[in-house]
Amino acid sequence: SPANAATEIGTVIEAYARAIESRDMGQLRRVYTTITSDQASAFSDFFSSTRALRAVLAVRNVQLDGNKATAHVEGTYEFTTTAGRVQQQPVTFQAEFRHDGGSWRLVNVR
């Protein structure tokens, strides 16, 4: 059902946020298996410039199309730089999902 899909997609976005907070590329790749090399490089650079990171992400809406879905996601990255500065960065992106094997998988972030 659409309500179940939205709930499950919210759970995937929550796992994505926790993976970002971990600052571990292995964990991020487990949640976002199709991450591009440019995206991975950007995250690696970001992770290496931070000492602590909190990702707060929320799904604002979900559009379903069979076994595919697109979600509009908004949130904030709150982090401490390696120089000790505390910063906040707003984030907004579209996330694409595919329903495979009984669950939703994150397949694209743009």
Image (cartoon, grey):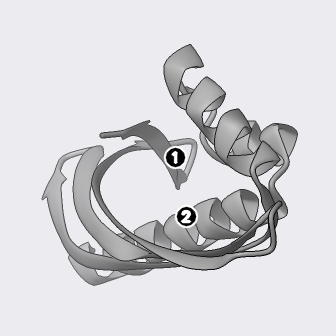
Please give left or right for residue 67 compared with residue 55 in the image: left
Closer-to-camera residue (55/98): 55
Determine which quarter of the picture holds residue 40: top right
Residue pictured at 72% horizontal, 45% vertical: 28
Please give left or right for residue 64 compared with residue 19 in the image: left
Q: As displayed, is residue 70 above or below residue 54?
A: above
Please give left or right for residue 16 compared with residue 47 in the image: left
Q: As displayed, is residue 49 above or below residue 42?
A: below
Residue pictured at 67% horizontal, 74% vertical: 79
Whole-percent x and y of residue 36? 52, 21
Q: Which residue is mark 1?
A: 105
Whether the residues at callouts 2 and 1 have beta carbons within 8 Å, the answer is yes
Specify the amino acid type for callout 2: Val
Whole-percent x and y of residue 96? 32, 45
Q: Earlier in the sequence, mark 2 or mark 1?
A: 2
Specify the amino acid type for callout 1: Arg
Q: Is residue 54 visible?
A: no
Q: Quadrant of the N terminus?
A: bottom left
Q: Secondary structure at mark 2?
A: helix
Whole-percent x and y of residue 66? 19, 46
Q: Residues within 10 Å of mark 1 (few under 14, many from 20)?
A: many
Determine which quarter of the picture holds residue 45: top right
Residue pictured at 28% horizontal, 55% vertical: 93
Residue pictured at 17% horizontal, 57% vertical: 64
Closer-to-camera residue (38/107): 38
Q: Quadrant of the C terminus?
A: top left
Q: Which residue is mark 2?
A: 12
Whole-percent x and y of residue 109? 38, 42
Cα separation, mark 2 vs mark 1, equals 7 Å
Q: Residues within 10 Å of mark 2 (few under 14, many from 20)?
A: some
